[in-house]
Amino acid sequence: MSDYILVIDEGTTSTRAVLFTADGTAVDSCQRPLTQHYPQPGLVEHDAEEIWNLTLACAQAMVAKAGGADRITSIGITNQRETVVFWDKRTGKPLAPAIVWQDRRTADNCAAMKAQGEEPVVQAKTGLLLDPYFSGSKIGWALENWPQLKDAGAHLAVGTVESYLVYRLTGGSHISDASNAARTALMAIGSGGWDDGLMDLFGVPRDILPEITDCAGDLGTTVPEHFGGAIRISGMAGDQQAATIGQGCFAVGQTKATFGTGAFVLTQTGTTLRQSRHRLLSTILYQLNGERHYALEGSVFVAGSLVQWLRDDLGLISHAAETEPLARSVPDNNGVYLVPALSGLGAPHWRSDARATISGLSFAATKAHVARAALEAMAHQTYDLKTAFAADGADWAELRIDGGMVANDWMAQDLADMLTIDVERPAFVETTALGAAMLAAVGCGLFPSLEDAASMRGGVTRFAPMLDAAAREARLAGWADALARVLQ
């Protein structure tokens, strides 16, 4: 009997492998940093061969830790979304740099298409907006500007990171799971296939794209040479979708928020595709047995990076953990508000031109008030998102949180107070890897459904609203004033 599930978690700044038991216990992990390449301002690239080599090394280390390939029941994969890789079908070797999701080289192309009135059609088919963030414009740019891709002819393969890893692991299976395919802006997420009109719009031929598959099931088998024996791959999802699964958000309306560098909020909307009227994204949460479950998504650009800025650039704190005792050391924000538009504002505002402000300063303000205002901004931004979700008919009854920031108990309580809903934090906060493990467990038959696999999630801590209504309304009014000055 095999004992473990191996998860490959290929992120933006690092790649790692995590070894899980069937009850959701993380036994061990191996992590390696990825090199970030910035060839010009606004351009972000990865070396896809480095991605493969480091991912394989981490996975091999965990297979050895398990005692060999025969001790691994299956592999689950989760990955940085929207990043695209270009490789040769004959060798699996990359033909060009991987263009990372953060890359903005196609901003002018997207703006031109938007000016031509293409965005409503794109949004209706994909649930996404016309933005360089998504993969379609990146692929079209690369095909036009990198001659080696044209030279590859029928041997060219293109895919997001999980697609590339599967190709290398299996020795030639060219697939992409529905949650990742949904982020390319080339997939009609209502019907579940690549769309001819979208491919024409971005200049992407169908024959270079992978086959779209479920997120769990028989997704391939690794060639024996990688791990000393064949291991089946039975689960795949993009990182934010995997985190939502890891948080057990399987009922309509259940919502998770990941507070990392930025913040990503996803609300399960069931099997009916719901289009946003308030600049949220519609996306595929997961697809099982051909049935798609959808989510609405809202992204905040600045979350943990705000605390990093206070530490590294302003020198107000020495460690991120200092923000919690500083916030607790004062009874309120003393009128200080921080709007963290350090790289513009994300959903629901989508204002790339917005700039950060700290307002309400006086001689009575201390660094404790600024630190508190920074943490309060997390709840304020999340409140704005909750308002947009509610306007789209997808209000939250509770919020399940994860990510590096949520170890801060003060911030978790402040979220509950400002949102006036219970906030739930799992004991195991690495929910992205756990979600991939849950998909793999379902895909290989350890659990009959994701709902059953939710037993892998473990214990939680709950934070209930405690702030009185008058104090809450005063906070929200102050935030609205500060935000209005940024948006004017």
Image (spheres, rainbow, N blue to C red):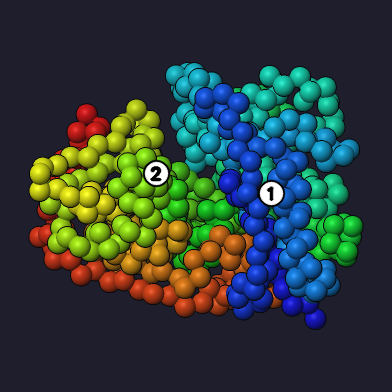
196 relative to 299, above or below: above
- The residue where tag 2 is placed is 312
Where, quadrant-wise, is the N terminus in this rendering?
bottom right
> In the rendered structure, which disc, 2 or 1, sits on the residue that comes first in sequence?
1
Q: CA distance from mark 2 to mark 1?
A: 33 Å
Amino acid, disc 1 = Glu
Residue, far bottom: 1
Q: Secondary structure at mark 2?
A: helix
Amino acid, disc 2 = Asp
* Direction from residue 125 to residue 357 in the image, left or right: left
Q: How many marks?
A: 2
Q: Report the mark closest to the observer, 2 or 1.
A: 2
Q: Nearer the viewer, residue 468 or 261?
A: 261
* Direction from residue 118 to residue 380 in the image, left or right: left
Horizontal and vertical percent position of residue 230:
86, 63
Q: Residue 162: which numbered mark, if any?
A: 1
- Residue at horizontal 14 percent and vertical 48 percent from the top: 365
Number of residues whose C-alpha sits closer than 10 Å to that of mark 1, classed few (under 14), some (14–19) or many (20 or more): many
Q: Is residue 180 visible?
A: no
Where, quadrant-wise, is the C terminus in this rendering?
top left
- Residue at horizontal 39 percent and vertical 35 percent from the top: 343
Q: Nearer the viewer, residue 379 or 367?
A: 367
Number of residues whose C-alpha sits closer than 10 Å to that of mark 2, classed few (under 14), some (14–19) or many (20 or more): few
Horizontal and vertical percent position of residue 360:
14, 42
- Residue at horizontal 12 percent and vertical 59 percent from the top: 471
Horizontal and vertical percent position of residue 76:
69, 61
